[in-house]
Image (tube, coloured by chain):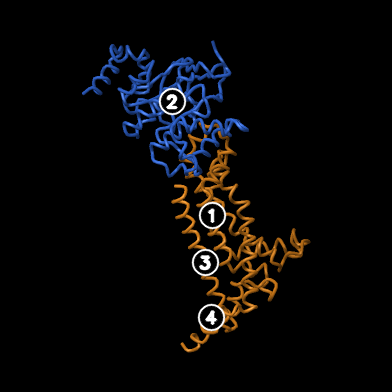
Amino acid sequence: MGALSESLVLAAGLVTHFDAHLVDIVLLSLRVSFTATLIAAVIGLPLGAAIAVGRFAGRPALIVMLNAMMGLPPVVVGLVVYLLLSRAGPLGTFGLLFTPGAMIIAQTILITPIIAALTRQIVADAWGEYREQLTSLGAGTLRAAMTLLWDTRFSLATVMLAGFGRAIAEVGAVMIVGGNIAGVTRVMTTTIALETSKGDLPLALALGLVLIAIVVLLNALAQLTREWAKARFG
Amino acid sequence: MADSATGLPIRLHQVAAAPGGVRVLTGIDIELKAGGRTVLLGPNGAGKSTLLRVLHGLIPPSAGSIAWGDAHTRPQGQAMVFQRPVMLRRSAADNVRYALDLAGVRGAEVDARIAEALDEVGLRALANRPARVLSGGEQQKLAFARVWALRPEVLFLDEPTASLDPAAARSVEQIIADIHARGTTIVMTTHNLVQAKRVADDILFLHAGRLTERTSAQEFFTRPRSAQAAEFLEGERL
């Protein structure tokens, strides 16, 4: 109990004094996960909207597959990306393995299905309400999809935050493809895993506190966005 | 004479419709000409709203054929106001702007039409208010502003006053009269017989998915030809 209290005090000190090592790790985590979320949004938002509004052969199967992919095991994604990026793999020539780029790729693969599937659901619900009106006004499928994406933007912001939360809290995939190299690919989750296994609890606890604070902040932001949008736009 | 530019007359030949796999309309033959105000009447489930959507091209016929002028695809120049208006999450003015953009209206004419349309329905002061926070009556008026700005040749109205109080309903009726006065053909469903008397030139009476009577409004309300129409009017008078 005494050791835990001592670790907590040291952890709090690292956080409040903006320890340089801790700040570097946090910044790298934010950079990797933010970039992955951005790329996943560029792919997932239009993909989800297209599946919601479009009518084509194989659509039901695609929806099932997309929903199933929300539960992709991170270590499996990490393994696949590792095989693709390893020297002998098809993308080995790019030299991305054990770089932040590889971690971004892995996180993008993990959260794109989440963003696409949740976008599809939100846009499909809106399409149920808007379909007749937009069709009556002469909106084609593409224009309708773009209109729905814009009109559901506040709900979709929450989806993006959920994707970011999933990415930044993920450990298995980034550990495999990043290699947890100090100062290069060591992010919050992989550092927590490593430091805990070494018995060096203060840094692990400090990063845990930061991680939890980020997740709470994201949820608060999502909630405030929803409430503000409801009051402002109905 | 057919006018393919306006999509009139609208001709339905032996049209059936089965939205969602349920047969709602059977053997409908209609020709709607330019300039009239036609009201679809009938009991609940008769197929009025479905017929309106078929006429507007929102529901394809499951049998028979439909032609707008010489065309078999829905032309521009039609608009529809629904019982529950659907507003985009943007300002009242931008909802009208969106409709004009889809209709291909560009340049300075856009702002002029928006101002004119909002004036017509009395919403000019609320132009920058988010559309979805307007009251139900204001949203319905905004839906009319949208179609006023579009200047349609044909306007379909699906029970446009059903969820409005009497004062708002009369206000909307005046807007409908103004739109008709500009030469727009009106096709409307309503459950309000008093309103139908005020608005209609012609009545189409539907019963169980079939068109059982087409006549002038005056004749329909004084001497209905079909037993179903007579029974319907009698029930409404009770």
Looking at the image, is mark 4 or mark 1 earlier in the sequence?
A: 4
Q: Nearer the viewer, mark 4 or mark 2?
A: 4
In the rendered structure, find residue A157 and report the number of the disc placed on it.
1
On the image, numbered disc 2 is attached to which residue?
Answer: B52
Callout 4 and callout 2 share a chain: no
Tell me if mark 2 has few (under 14), some (14-19) or many (20+) residues whose alpha carbon lies within 10 angstroms of its own.
many
- Tell me the distance, in whole angstroms, between the alpha carbons under discs 4 and 1: 31 Å
Instruction: Find residue A192 and report its horizontal and vertical position in percent.
Output: 58, 76
- Tell me the distance, in whole angstroms, between the alpha carbons under discs 4 and 3: 18 Å
Q: Secondary structure at mark 2?
A: helix
Q: Are marks 4 and 1 in contact (CB under 8 Å)?
A: no
Q: Secondary structure at mark 4?
A: helix
On the image, numbered disc 4 is attached to which residue?
Answer: A12
Amino acid marked by disc 2: Leu
- Tell me the distance, in whole angstroms, between the alpha carbons under discs 4 and 2: 68 Å
Q: Are marks 2 and 3 in contact (CB under 8 Å)?
A: no
